[in-house]
Image: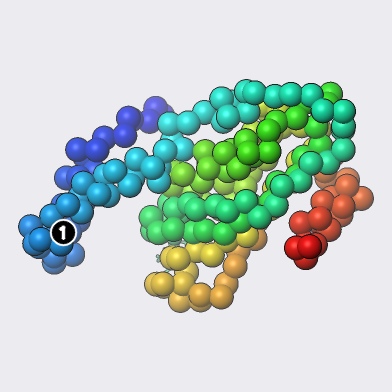
Amino acid sequence: MTRGEYNEEGVRKAVRLFLESIGEDPDREGLLDTPDRIARAGRELFSGLSQDPKEVLAKRFTVDTEEMVLVRDIELYSVCEHHLLPFHGVAHIGYIPSGHEVTGLSKLARLVDVYARRPQVQERLTQQIADALVNELHAKGVIVVTDCEHLCMSMRGVKKSQARTLTSAVRGVMRESTTRAEAMQLILQPRG
Ligand SMILES: Nc1nc2c(ncn2[C@@H]2O[C@H](COP(=O)(O)OP(=O)(O)OP(=O)(O)O)[C@@H](O)[C@H]2O)c(=O)[nH]1
Ligand SMILES: [Zn+2]
């Protein structure tokens, strides 16, 4: 299925209809600019839909290592596809490069955003990050762990504000127990 372009006018109309439908007056002063604000904010919040992870990981360089690279506590903000409410937390990404080929550290954080800035479920987000590192960077092994709070579980519904959801995706040589244990130890290590 092909995706459409982001349509600001469509979002403006939908937000106006939404406001009317919840019993609000979209023409009262405080709400007059809201459809336009949401249309502009949505362009940013859902920008990942039009971004290609290949481009994010296209620039690479060589470093004399085939040891694990791990960036942890990468902030992430996404929107759950069931309620369109935010879920947010952190991603930890570890990978073992292939042929000394690495990506810039910031690109790992950009990769998180490519997949987070779209309607998501946490499990898929985690897997997509891991798969991009295998497919585009040809990483020999990858571990991605995400740790998030879902507002659909805290501000409504079951209202469990302390609940955190952790999901992981492990690929290639990172599945071996010693390598995986090393990565988990780095992820769980208290901040120094
Ligand atoms: N597996 C998974 N579930 C999610 C995620 N984000 C939200 N959910 C869940 O999606 C489910 C949707 O359940 P439904 O029964 O269709 O919707 P609902 O009636 O609004 O459910 P409640 O939240 O239990 O009130 C809920 O259990 C949410 O907690 C996610 O990233 N992964
Ligand atoms: Zn939800």
Residues 112 and 20: in front is 112
Q: Tell me: 112 left or right of 27.
A: right
Q: In percent of the image, x 76 and y 56: which residue is there?
A: 187
Mark 1 C-beta to ligand 2 under 8 Å:
no
Counting the numbered discs, the total is 1
Residue 10 visible from this viewpoint: yes
Q: Work out whether 67 lies above or below 183.
A: above
Q: Work out whether 61 lies above or below 38.
A: above
> What is the x, y in percent for residue 168?
69, 52
Q: Work out whether 63 lies above or below 89.
A: above
Query: Which quadrant of the figure contains the N terminus?
Result: top left
Q: In percent of the image, x 16 and y 45: which residue is there?
A: 13
Residues 153 and 182: in front is 182
Q: Tell me: 119 left or right of 36.
A: right
> What is the x, y in percent for residue 140?
81, 33
Seen as rendered, the residue at the extreme right is 178
Q: In percent of the image, x 57 and y 59: which residue is there?
A: 89
Q: Callout 1: helix, strand or loop?
A: helix
Is the residue marked by circle 1 packed among few (<14), some (14-19), or many (20+) residues within 10 Å?
A: some
> What is the x, y in percent for residue 122?
56, 53
> What is the x, y in percent for residue 132?
64, 33
Query: Which quadrant of the figure contains the C terminus?
Result: bottom right
> Where does label 1 land, which residue?
31
Residue 124 visible from this viewpoint: no
Mark 1 residue type? Leu
Seen as rendered, the residue at the extreme front is 192
Q: In percent of the image, x 83 and y 45: which residue is there?
A: 175
